[in-house]
Image: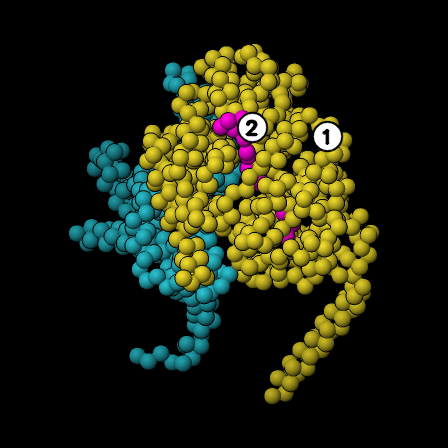
Amino acid sequence: MLRMSGFTATLRILFGTVLILVGACSDSASQRQTLRFWAMGREGEVIAQLIPEFERRNPDLRVEVQQLPWTAAHEKLLTAFAADALPDLCQLGNTWIPELAALNALTALDPLVAKSKVVDAQDYFPGIWDTNVVDGHLHGIPWYVDTRVLFYRSDLLRKAGFERPPRSWAEWELALDAIKKEVGPARYAILLPLNEFEPLLALGLQQDDPLLSKDGQWGNFSGPGFRRALNFYAGMFRKGWAPAMNNSAISNVWTEFGRGYFSFYMSGPWNIEEFKRRLPAQHHGDWMTAPLPGPDGPGASTAGGSSLVIFRSSRRPQAAWRMIEYLSEPDTQVRFHALTGNLPPRRAPWRDKQLSHDIYAKAFREQLERARPTPKVPEWERIMSEMQLAAEQVVAGGISIDEATQSLDRRVDAILEKRRWMLARSRPQ
Amino acid sequence: MKVPALAWGFVAPALLVIGVFFALPVMAGLALSFTDFDIYALADTHNLRFVGLDNYLRLLRTPLFWQALGNTLYFVVIGVPLSIGLSLGAALLLHARVARFTPFFRTALFAPVVTTLVAVAVVWRYLFQTRYGMVNHVLANFGIAPLDWLGDPHLAMPTIILLAVWKNFGYNMVIFLANLQAVPEEVYEAARIDGASTFQQLLYITLPILRPTLVLVGILTTAGYFQLFAEPYVMTQGGPLRSTVSVLYFMYEEGFKWWNFGTASTVAVLLFALMFAVTWTLMRVSRSESAA
């Protein structure tokens, strides 16, 4: 009994000390609120250089950045959601927005945008802006964009008899055929790594048919639109223009591009810097970017990238919104571009000479006006992996396009079963 | 006999730890396998459905599950004998009286076991690179056309088997070696006096003495190889054409990539049942043989 009370006393003293310590901390921090911000990959590294300016303008705020690697980010977000440990604001790949919106984890930003003087919806590229709108509510503000365009070897294209890059599928096929004849059997006209879904997705988005039908409840891959895209994609392999390999078989894309192993490559903005830096010196003037050719004339492409979101669990949404506004200012966006090479999602920063004078970025500027969002269902990433499997089956497995797309639709319908059940339940007939 | 209360007190801490960190998660996993727990259920438990045996029935109709099972069996059936054979061979060579520099070779052969798989995978991907890899370079000297080791659906699994066997055989080798060194020299001496050849000594003395170890190593290796995951994860991500998706890799994708914990738990239960059955059969067979 005596020992117990002694123990209790010790506990009390300890507890008291902790309380005093905590009190002391919160005392000094009472004027400054801490804003917790999760950022990923390269952005997480460079964001630190943009924060001092924000903290100077907002002396009452302190930003605490946590850097997540992309490979672990998704898992971390979901476990943090389950544990109720999400930060105030976060960088989010825009294909993840439907998933976190389904979890009801994101603050709707429509009222904040309506009052904002900085975030002007009209200034943003419509396809990119749209990726953040799920079920009629805006859940994120685009931070930077990622769309796919054509990188090509202008010297090899000229050698094959073409002065300008192709604008339509028909022109593209002519160019591919001519280049393949020019470079011979050991080299190829285009590289489409079989384990990357983005090229085929971009071709699929160029079609008038949506990839999912009836509000994202059923797969529409056996429809004429996607079949046409897959046929065009598989045709590039069938005709020997593209090698049937995945990107682990290509040890170094930049070296191979420099060697002329392939002349066309569909890729994103980060490769502008990489190609400038890594191509051999004698090939520095031999490449260019071009908007993606479409079935008849310039076509659409993907609308990827990252958005900034505020989590519903945040107790400081107003402060988080100030941070988003700061990062969305055209001047900040120009600085951000200089630091990362990331492309701005709105038109104003593109007028800065740093971007308007960049000849390689020009194709992206044009393409962004034609960027198209993917269906906004949480299951989308899984559907993409099934789509690429179907493409691989056609290209390397010898399965017919009809068979592959029908089987793909069956798998996609099975994946979407739960979504259909939930929609049917939320809208009683 | 009645166990005194005091005894329960002694084992209570251990039981508690096992209960909280083992029994409870296992029961929870089993329970999950009868539901469709997924990302929607994480948001709101109203979205959780009790589906009974549906997960099991659906899985048995999923072609990819059967493919994963086939790939895993392929890996086990080829990989386990190859691995044990290599371990045994290496151990016998190291134990041979004519062997020189034994400590060096023992260390060298054991080294792959203690190296990090991810680092090894990087080197192996270079070695097996289609156009510049050393393996194809060496084969070219014999007039063999370049093989797409990791990109050809028929070759990817054999390459994975090669990697796994190379990475793991050293471990069993050390066990065999320890066992061999414990065999008294007099037994061999007696055999030689009786006129037994080296091969006969191996067949009638060494192997029977190693028998219990062989059984143990066989069971442990089989159980380990059924849990194939890391090798395809770092080398091929399950491709090409899903030819290196193992049951565990399939489970990982369902659970941690797509967040379908219901299905993932079902896969786990099925894999457990399969491994239990195989191990049990192996033990029964070895026991009845030793009884005979």
Image height of A311 relative to A174, above or below: below
The residue closer to the viewer here, A10 or B76, is: B76
Magenta residue span: A293-309
- The residue under label 1 is which amino acid type? Ser
Image height of A151 relative to A182, above or below: below
Which chain is cyan in the picture? B
Host chain of mark 2? A
Q: Is the magenta stretch mostly helix, strand or loop?
A: strand
Badge 1 marks a residue whose secondary structure is helix
The x, y position of residue A83, in whole percent, is: 56, 62
The x, y position of residue A423, in whole percent, is: 44, 57
Q: Quadrant of the N terminus of chain B?
A: bottom left
Badge 2 marks a residue whose secondary structure is strand
* Residue at (38, 29) in percent of width and height: A396
- The residue under label 2 is which amino acid type? Pro
* Residue at (43, 39) in percent of width and height: A387
Verify whether residue A302 appears in magenta.
Answer: yes
Q: Quadrant of residue B4?
A: bottom left
The residue closer to the viewer here, A272 or A423, is: A423
